[in-house]
Image: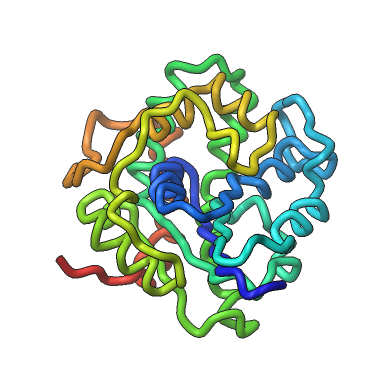
Amino acid sequence: MSNTVRVALWCCQRSLSTLFERCIAAGGDIEIFHEVYLAAYRFGPQHRQENATFETDDNYTYENVHKMLSQKFPLGRAAFIKDMAFAVEGRFPELSSEFCHTFLIRSPQKVIRSYVKLLQGCNFDENYVSELRQKLPNSFKQQCLLYDYFIEHGYQSNMIVIDADDFAAMPEIVLRRYCQETGLTFGGCMLRCESLDSIPEDWHCSEVLKKATKASGSHERALRSTGIEPSTSTGKGPDLPIVWQKCVDECEQFYRIMFERRTIFKE
């Protein structure tokens, strides 16, 4: 690989990750890889989705994704991938040590409340929703395991871990620190975005994934946002259905591990 600054952000679902990604993209001079491993996991020929049936995208093999991320870019142009940790489960050794690996976490209570709200407006069948509930704890678990893998195999001695609450409450402080520690260049433009109807054409992203997110509305709020309004929301609301609260409880043990590892930001 060249001397290109390469940064990876490993997330769980509904963690403000697309909004964070948009902030990074607004800095300019950067290649954005949007959930390319998730596309291989969910839509590619090696997909691991069990119950739900989706359109396939044969271009998104794991091998092709690795090649995509290792290509050379013009001098001065950085590369940034935002993806889900669970999408690389069992494939950690294939990940490049040339990337600066970082994490974005969020409270399971807030993640699942966001999911429940999203699913109310979708027409997903019960098989998909049931599988989602079953797999969400593993999403949090894989963040822990991936972090451990990077440390144990000497990828990095320290990694920045952002809690979504900190990003929402003090976006400029978080983004400045993030850029400082990853080698990206911070600019005030990162705090402002244009409202979008879909994933930008210049982002590297599966066309099938684009259609799926458009249909579900999962990225709509993040794409339509024109900036980050500092938030102190507690995420409290009516009691969750028992099956979802059980899911929260199962996720919580893994979230707490990552929360203890979080980077401390000071206003």
Asked whether the viewer can see residue 84, the reply is no
Closer to us: 202 or 13: 202
- Height in image: 146 above or below 10? below
- Height in image: 145 above or below 125? below
Residue under the point 64% across and 25% down = 127
Where's residue 159, x and y in %?
Answer: 46, 74
Display colour scheme:
rainbow
Question: Quadrant where the N terminus lies?
Answer: bottom right
Please identify the residue farthest to the front as the structure is shown: 75
Residue under the point 24% across and 29% down = 238
Residue 79 as seen in the image, left or right of residue 226 = right
- Height in image: 218 above or below 5? above
Residue under the point 84% across and 36% down = 58
Closer to us: 86 or 159: 159
Residue 93 as seen in the image, left or right of residue 210 = right
Where's residue 118, x and y in %?
Answer: 43, 25
Residue under the point 32% across and 69% down = 177
Residue 226 as seen in the image, left or right of residue 10 = left
- Height in image: 105 above or below 210? below
Closer to us: 14 or 249: 14
Q: How many marks?
A: 0
Q: Quadrant of residue 261?
A: bottom left
Where's residue 265, x and y in %?
Answer: 24, 68
Where's residue 119, x and y in %?
Answer: 47, 23
Asked whether the viewer can see residue 93, the reply is yes
